[in-house]
Image (tube, coloured by chain):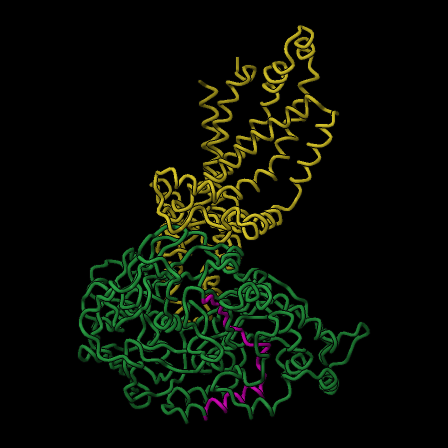
Amino acid sequence: MRYLLTRLGFYLVAIWGSLTINFFLPRLAPGDPAATLMQRMGQMTPAQEQSIAVIYGLNKHVPLFRQYVTYLNQLAHGDLGISIQFFPSTVASVIRAAILWTLFLGGVSLLIGFVVGVSLGVLVAWRRTRPVDSIVTPSTIFLASVPYFWLAMAVVYVFALKLNWFPINHSYNIDVSPSFSFSFLLDILDHAALPVATIVVVSVGNWLITMRSTMIGVLSEDYITMAIAKGLHPLRVALSYGARNALLPVTTSAGIAVGFIVGGALLTEVVFSYAGLGYLLYTSVTSLDYPLIQGLLVIITLGVLGANFIVDMVYVLLDPTVRRP
Amino acid sequence: MRHKRLLAVAAAVPLMFTGTVNLAGATPVPASQAQSSTINPNTILTIGRENNTIFTRNFNPFAPVPNLGVVTAIYEPLVIYTPTNSKYTPWLAKSWSYGPNAMSLTFNLRSGVLWSDGQPFSATDVAYTFQILKKWFAGGGFPYIKNVIAVNPTTVEFTFSQPSSIALGQVGQQVIVPKHIWDTVSNPVDYTNPDPVGTGPFTQIENFEPQGYVIGRNPNYWQPGKPYFAGIRYPAYAGDSVNYALYKGELDWSDLYIPDVQKTYVAKDPKHYYYFFGKTGGTINLVFNTTLKPLNDAVVRKAISMAINRQANVDSVYGNYTAVGNCTGVTPVSSWYDPAVANSCGWTTENVAKANAMLDAAGYKRGSDGIRVSPSGQKMEFTLETGVTSSDYVQSAENVAADVKAIGIDLVVTPKSWSTVISDVNLGHFQVAHMYGLVAPTPYNFFDFYMACANVVPVGQTATENWGRFCDPKADKLLARMATATTTQAQHAVADQLEALFAADAPAVPLFTQPDWGEFNTTRFTGFPTASNPYATGQSRYPGAFLIETTIKPVPGAFPQG
């Protein structure tokens, strides 16, 4: 119990620290939202610029520390403010429009990538130096080092544009209203196939390598030799004795990766015009949309720290030696 | 990547229309237009725009960046200016006239126009729109408006605090909102207006999804029988995937920069795919910080200009889609262009030998490394800033720098984020910059921007105009005359003098005209503008979109019957 509480306390401090950095970091960038808006809209007369400043509240010269306090206060009430790019829509409504797709895309890709990568990792570790290892390991590493956007664009070109096997973009057919029907589910899967496939292809390599190296470490342990000597079935040794122990470090990376899902997949969203938070984060940074940047960073912070916290708890279950006596 | 085009709603001296001008075939409109029973509900036009992954249900026309369709389909202005033929088309206003010395502007509005909820449109709505701007938006960019009065339901009068013949293009292109709706809104600044009521051809929001929405036909539209189809769809595209959609035929109309458009797009379906790029955008210039020596010397600026091979630059960046810059500062397609001035000056024609001779004669000797040094000992090495995300400008800047090396001046291309570049030019913390252009119905704003002493702000203070801080008092005098000139003849006479002054002073160096993009697909709709019938540009974000939306017709049989 005390372990839990101390961990919780640590996370609360980490959250506060992140939120403070979230506030000050975007404001360190040169320029201001009105200037970037001017570039998008064209030269303005001083009168028009003044008008914009009034709309955004930039004409009131509030001291930075006062703005920071207001920001924390609004956050405490769950008010993320009004976006500058999507003015006057609220940051919450902007995020709400895209977050489910980000979670879906990121979650499914991570799950498939993890399962495939870890399973292959177990396989090549168990059969290290055999042909399987010599072929699979280098190929997945090669795929992991292919520039993602190039791969994605090539995939879209071949499979969507030329062969017409899959749609070229979007999360679902925009003529159709979302509904809880089987046909809509198929539509979503149809549109998600290429984005998920491309992400899985480039991420499998990482999971495989991590699993393989920890697994090889575990396989050299004495209890593995003992298990084999006892005559246990190889599959059982590999999974119950080997993989189960090797999974621990991999779980930590998986936990962090889960947290970062909410950061979105920028390149996927750009290439596939897939609704998501990644491109939003990118455009909010380039247009200095402070409220949206802050809102997205808050979500990422909470996502990563939350996932980390859960991993910490799960770790205790997985590895009894971690628990304080 | 394509550069973001800009519509500055500033304008300058208008043509004066005192007569009544009607749209062809439009008669005073009867009360109700329930024509939707004869329009196939499946006839939806799909327009492709980029840089969106999601949309929010925000249709506020006063937002700094309104959603797609808000000011080009839902809400309408009083007049529409088209740069392809330099015409003002009467829209919600039938006619207009200036008062003496351009101290007032009166619009005569159409009668019988209805809002999409059936309520009548009148001058009260126009006056109310400008009241909202004045109260909530610090005047919305029209500080010279003293008062807006609805004299009677079809007449609205603007009075100004100073002579303002630039007013027509500005106030005339402001979209009008209904008083009976906005009267009930407590804060127009924050209001997201989820179910808009407008006078435009498309007003009914249907199928709103974050990744695209359809705006359906206005059942009460004031042009009888129009529009000829049921709705406009705006899907969200982040970047290149809009090009795929265009290529695959999923779009009917788009305004993208497509390299080698004939091969990349038209060749796929030459029967239906075509493009129309108007050479009607703003002039793209090299801007010089004239508070710095030796950039304040016109000889240096003109010499730099003469070193540039403009045609090669345009070919490499835009593949010959557009016109090269000339010394009037005005695009050759415009009716304001004065060929006499353009032909008499020489500094926009490539002539490296002459440029070298000019610099030698003025005392800018070459150093041992080939780079010239000014008489006061300054090395002729300058940073050339531009926005890193505009790959066309970066490429153009590189071409320019390579050309200018030949005359012994070193321009170091320094791409930065646009917000930094804008910050730099506003504050005067730059040397040379490759900037975007200004679009307006007349050249008044261009010359005001680049030459007026009244706009000069000291380095270190923010200037939104006249980044180069160039001052010629003759320009201010001419601009003042243009502001009060109320006949087309008088305006053109002053504009010619301004062009001559620009050619003499060379405050900035015009490189090329920004093309107005436009790609079309006639599989499902016909009637888009073409080079032989340029009734509008292909830009879907300008008021000219209304002209296209009320002209095109669905191809029979292209859609399933509804």
Say if the magenta span includes residue B497: yes
Say if the magenta span includes residue A119: no
Query: Which image quadrant for residue B324?
Result: bottom right
Q: Residue at x 47, y 27 (%)?
A: A310
Check the image and name the residue furthest to the front: B557
- Reply above or below: B209 against B131: above
Residue B316, position in %: x, y? 65, 70
Q: Of residues A86 and B560, which is closer to you in this image?
A: B560
Q: Residue at x 44, y 42 (%)?
A: A188
Q: Of residues B553 and A64, which is closer to you in this image?
A: B553
Query: Which image quadrant for residue B251?
Result: bottom left
Q: Residue at x 41, y 76 (%)?
A: B10
Residue B417, position in %: x, y? 56, 60
- Reply above or below: A278 against B281: above
- Reply above or below: A50 against A132: below
- Left or right: where B125 falls relative to B57: left
Check the image and name the residue furthest to the right: B368
Magenta range = B493-522
- Left or right: where A229 falls relative to B418: right
Chain drawn green in the picture = B
Chain drawn yellow in the picture = A
